[in-house]
Image: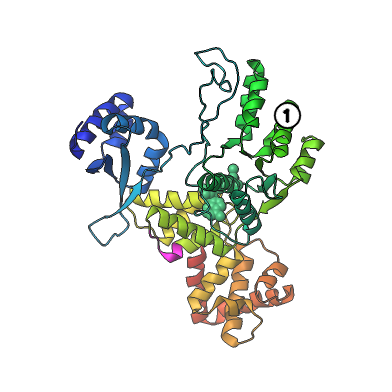
Amino acid sequence: MATDHNQVWQNCIDIIKDNVSMQAFKTWFEPIKPVKLEKSVLTIQVPSQFFYEWLEEHYVPLLKKIIRKELGPEGRLEYSIIMENNYDNANPYTVKVPTTNKKAIKNPSVSMPLDMSDTPIKNPFIIPGLRKLNIDSNLNPNYSFDNFIEGDCNRLARSAGFAVANKPGGTSFNPLLIYGGVGLGKTHLAHAIGIEIKNQYPEKTVLYVSSEKFTHQFIDAVKNNSVNDFSHFYQMIDVLIIDDVQFFSGKEKTQDVFFHIFNHLHQTGKQIVLTSDKPPVEMQGMEQRLLSRFKWGLSADLQTPSLETRIAILEKKMYADGIELPKEVVEYLAYSITTNIRELEGALISLIAQASLNKKAITLDLAKQMIDKFVKNTAREVSIDYIQKVVCDYFDLPIELLKSKTRKREIVQARQIAMYFAKKMTKSSLANIGLHCGGKDHATVLHACRTVNNLQETDKHFRKYLEDLEKKLSIQ
Ligand code: ADP
Ligand code: MG
């Protein structure tokens, strides 16, 4: 076995070449430099975070196979990422990221006394003879509780999830149904529960499955005449986590088989965790008896995160990836993307990728250009909150004062300017703008707009303020 990092990487490269297109090879593998080899861990240097994520997403199975071949079963890959973030400095700095350790979280072997024909195994639910079966939990180790930021928006769901993880099947939260809009963390939380249970109770069989996969497995089982095996398989799980159960809507047969599995698990004290994009009362096309089961335990919702939570989520992600961004950029992202954490993270990742690939500094301007691509299907509009923040930063005033009822002269003026821009740049009603700016009524907002317009014509300093602010607030 080769022991020198250059040699090992060269061997890897030779195999990779044969397995990917020339274009892909040139783009994604040629720029990689081997850095070191220590205790079966090969560290390679990649030019950017984006690069690393691309490799992880598209080439992990291949890389894993090759690394095992070269370095044995203990072989691992670590990435060292060059961040071209520090632009005044000719030396790029390096962050080290271990491979997303997507090692399967293992369940204990389970044997089922099923009488089976031998190889080849056509039916995935059949366990030949008394051979042991290892069920992969399908849990993503990155979706842990540690990585799940707590906020008012998720406190109930998070603590219920944590309680369930500490005592699976032993709380009144059975089933635990987590519901909420797209990109608010349902899947993350569902995994976190599974991971925590595996940490505390390694002997328990935990299975995460999307309702889509469950449905497809069931359809296959029907085709193969193995519905009984399918049910048995699910009935021996200790903690069953089914994601996006709304997908069962209108699928009567799947609901039927799930109903029986549910009953069996519930009666035997096993834990069931479900997620859905709606609360049970709004689930259409779901059988009543199933809906009533869903309500047996606890339904906890995930709401849209507050600004502070959004910033904390971004900071956590940056920290995990070893990236630093100017504070104003982080705030801008958090102010602009308010209703979907996946989009928020997507914007952050793209911003870093853009900057890194094009060797541009990550500036507020770049962030503004990028953001449009991420806030899909909604006309981009700055928020009143963002306007208030920019105005307050500009005049160096605390934002609380602007939102208060104080009538101090300089605050009144800043507040009027914020109202003026809110009227001009958002679709908010006068009443809503007033509400955001110290609980004023619509007449006050109208008055503010007139005052600002008048001053703008008569006072050139004031006009300059407005021009500066307008520039700061404009999207592009
Ligand atoms: P959903 O399943 O509700 O559509 P996901 O669980 O897939 O949403 O979450 C979308 C993204 O947002 C994931 O990358 C997830 O890690 C992240 N995320 C959601 N909530 C949080 C949170 N509270 N803290 C950290 N990351 C979060
Ligand atoms: Mg999801």
Give how far across and how far down residue 4 sits, in percent: 18, 38
Instruction: Identify which residue is drawn at 21% across, 31% down.
Output: 1
The total number of labels drawn is: 1
Instruction: Identify which residue is drawn at 26% across, 55% down.
Output: 92
Which residue lies most toward the bottom here? 408
Front in this rendered view, residue 213 or 89 = 213
Instruction: Identify which residue is drawn at 60% across, 19% down.
Output: 114
Q: Is residue 341 visible?
A: no
Residue 343 lies left or right of residue 259; in this view the side is left
Give how far across and how far down residue 457 sits, in percent: 56, 78
Q: Quadrant of residue 275?
A: top right
Front in this rendered view, residue 220 or 104 = 104
Give how far across and how far down residue 374 sits, in percent: 52, 49
Q: Is residue 440 visible?
A: yes
The part of the chain drawn in magenta is 324-329
Give how far across and how far down residue 410 sits, in percent: 56, 85
Q: Residues within 10 Å of mark 1 (few under 14, many from 20)?
A: few
Instruction: Identify which residue is drawn at 57% across, 15% down.
Output: 116
Residue 303 among those drawn in magenta:
no
Q: Which residue is mark 1?
A: 251
| Amino acid at pointer 1 | Lys
Residue 213 lies left or right of residue 345; in this view the side is right
Image coloring type: rainbow
